[in-house]
Image (cartoon, rainbow, N blue to C red):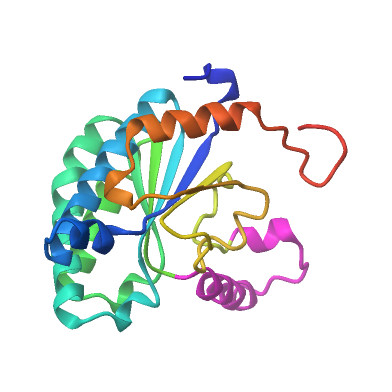
Amino acid sequence: MTNKTSLPRHIAFIIDGNGRWARARLLPRSAGHEAGIRCLRKIVDKCFSFGVEAVSAYVFSTENWKRPQDEIDKLFSLFKKFFEKEKKSLQGSGVRIRVMGDISAFPADIRESIERALADTAQNTKHVLNIGINYGGRAEIVRAAQKFVSAGEREISEEAFEKYLDTAGLSDPDILVRTCEKRLSNFMLWQCAYSEIFFVDKPWPAFGTKDLAKILDEYAGRVRKFGGLNAQ
């Protein structure tokens, strides 16, 4: 594992392959989602123990509503359990929970669980866990543009616009990790403009702490120029 001076501040994960992981084991897709939540908790803890400041995770996209209703219901149950149960341990570790996406579309009990987790951890400053739920990068940009106009902003600049994104105040991801597939799937399109991207050819529940350490070591050896000639 590399030293802390070469650590990323922010790592983002596109979680994919829960269903494939379950199918390979002759298990229902719901078992894959349960394993995916357990994996997320493990990887988040490891990131924070390494000294990473923020972790973003894509758990439910604006396109996931197309899935069968029984699968959506199971996911909702897992989300509610996560925000209610894991909030306690995250709170004790100084983790602030944030969400990006439109939670107004969820049932009232899910919204209430999310809102309580946000409120209860709002004052924490050690780490940030940012959950993408009913999230899509294009929808976020449109939502930000609507807020920008409603606020009466006159000067159009990247800095001014970023204040209206769901991630306002967070640094952009230094690393984006995607399991199973090799595409962005409408995730953090604005924020990942210069992220170092790592595609991992395994389903999310099979992603382990050794995979994370390998990515961090490779990241430490990359030269980030951000469009210029010299590393920054």
- Residue 95: % across, % down: 33, 37
Task: Give the quarter of the figure containing the C terminus.
Answer: top right
* Residue 151, magenta (yes or no): yes
- The residue depicted at 33 percent of the width and 38 percent of the height is 44
32, above or below 10, in the image: below
The magenta-colored residue range is 136-163
In which image quadrant can residue 34 be found? bottom left
Q: Nearer the viewer, residue 74 or 124?
A: 74
- Residue 154: % across, % down: 76, 71
- The residue depicted at 64 percent of the width and 77 percent of the height is 149
- Residue 11: % across, % down: 49, 42
Residue 79 in view (yes/no): no
Q: Nearer the viewer, residue 201 or 150?
A: 201
In which image quadrant can residue 123 be found? top left
Q: Residue reaching furthest top?
A: 3
- Residue 187: % across, % down: 50, 63
